[in-house]
Structure formats: C-alpha cells, structure tokens
Amino acid sequence: MGGFALVILLLLLALIGLGAYLFSSDSPQEETSQELPEQQQQQEEEEEEEKASQEETAASEQQQEKEEQPTPPPPEDPTLFLTVPKLGLYNHTVRNDRSEWALDLGAIKLPSTGFPWEKGDINTYIACHRVGWPGTESYNQCLNLPLMQKGDEIYLVDTTGMVYEYQVSEVFGISPMDVWVKEPIAGRDVVSLQTCTETPYDWWSMGSGLFGGGPGSGRLVVRADRVT
C-alpha cells in the first residue's frame, strides 16, 4: 500500500515538473514574437530618419553650390530689348537715357533705376510714348498700354542674350508728381512701364492733358514681377 502511494506521488511530481518545463519553454517564444514587430518598427523609423537626413544634406549642398557659382559680369552695354506680346511689341530697343531725344526714338530706362541683372530690390523703370513719332519705334508704342492686365507677360533681354521674364501684378494711374513710383519695392524685383494719359483716372482720352502734360495730366504704370 505504502509502495503504491509512493508511485502515485512520484507520478504527480513528474507531471508537475513536465508542466513547469512546458510553461517555461513557451514564455521565451511569446516574448520573442512580441519583440520582433517592435524591432522591425524601430528599424524602419531609423531608416526613414537616415533617408530624411541624407535628403536634407543633399539639398543643402545643392543650395551651397548654387550660391557659390560666380555671378556673371554685367553687360558692358546697358541697352535692353523689350517684348510685350499683348501690345505686339517685340525686341524694341530700350535706351538707358532719359532725354527727350531718346524717348522720341523709343522706350527709355531711367538711368537712376536698377537693371534686371542686379541683385536685391530692383525696379527697372521704363517710359514710352503713347503716340510718338512716325518712322520710329516710339510711334504708337504704348498706345494700348491700358489694355494690360494682371498675368500678362513682359520680357527684357540684355545685350548678352540673357532673358528676364515678368508677369504683370499691378496697373494703376498716378500724377506727374508721384515720383515715389520709381523707387525700389522691398522684397521685389519688378519692371515698370509708364506712359502718359489724359488724367490719372482717364486712360483713353487723347486731349490736352495727354499731349500738353501739366500737373493735371496723368501717368499710367504697369508693374510686373520677375518670374525668371
């Protein structure tokens, strides 16, 4: 009897030991299965961070290379050439001369204003006759300047062949005393086209104000921002 009890006791102990072994052998597998997705997620995050860092470094290097590129020297000849498709003007000469003689030949750039190849805040200010003189580029050169609208294109080309593209952003009238309009505008690179009008508000009539000038006459200004 005592021997039978001992056998039963030994069997129970063996079963308990087997259960403990099986339980302990399952735990690492469960822990490992839980750790794998976490390790994979962490690896993916590290790879994304490394990729973002590489892209940022490449962009920084490209910007640095762009800044280090030598600036081409300004053209020796300051003459510009004006194209305004909306007005049917193509490669009209723009002289860097504010004399009446030069204006009677065609568009002029006021020498006190900037050139498109310069850096910083630039207002390349160009004036042109509304009616002008037959046989010259000034004839009806800016007759239809009031037709210009926001988004219209203006092109300037220098004597080296460099093209500067602009899009119209503003069209407004001023009086002859509004000299502020020729000044640079903070944070902008623009070209301004100016022609005479009857009054600051009447852009189409052709009377004494347009032809005779005076303080009551007007000036129409089309301003365009640089896009390339």
Image (cartoon, rainbow, N blue to C red):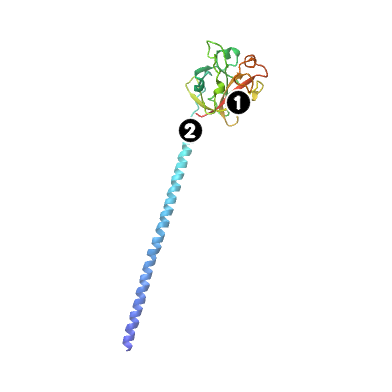
Residue in the picture at 39% in, 66% down: 27
Count how many numbered circles sit on residues in the image.
Answer: 2
Residue 115 location (% of width, % of height): 55, 23
What secondary structure is found at the residue carrying circle 1?
A: strand
> The residue under label 2 is which amino acid type?
Lys
- Give me the disc on residue 66: 2
**Res 145 → quadrant:** top right
Which residue is situated farthest in the right direction here?
215
Q: What residue do we see at 45% from left, 39% from top?
A: 58
Q: What residue sits 34% from the left and 74% below the top?
A: 18
Which residue is situated farthest in the front direction here? Answer: 205
Task: Name the residue tied to disc 1.
Answer: 172
Q: Residue at x 60, y 13 (%)?
A: 100
Q: Residues within 10 Å of mark 2 (few under 14, many from 20)?
A: few
Report the residue that reaches farthest toward the bottom.
Answer: 1
Under mark 1, the amino acid is Phe
Quarter of the image with the N terminus in it: bottom left
Find residue 65 and report its horizontal and vertical position in percent. 47, 34
- Is residue 210 shown above or below 71? above
Residue 195 occupies quadrant: top right
Measured from the top left, where is residue 225 in percent x and y? 54, 28
Residue 189 visible? The answer is: yes
Query: Sequence order check: which comes first, mark 2 or mark 1?
Result: 2
In the rendered view, tell whether residue 135 sits above or below residue 127. Answer: above
Q: Is residue 157 visible?
A: no
**Quick one: 192 or 24, which is closer to the camera?**
192
Q: CA distance from mark 2 to mark 1?
A: 37 Å
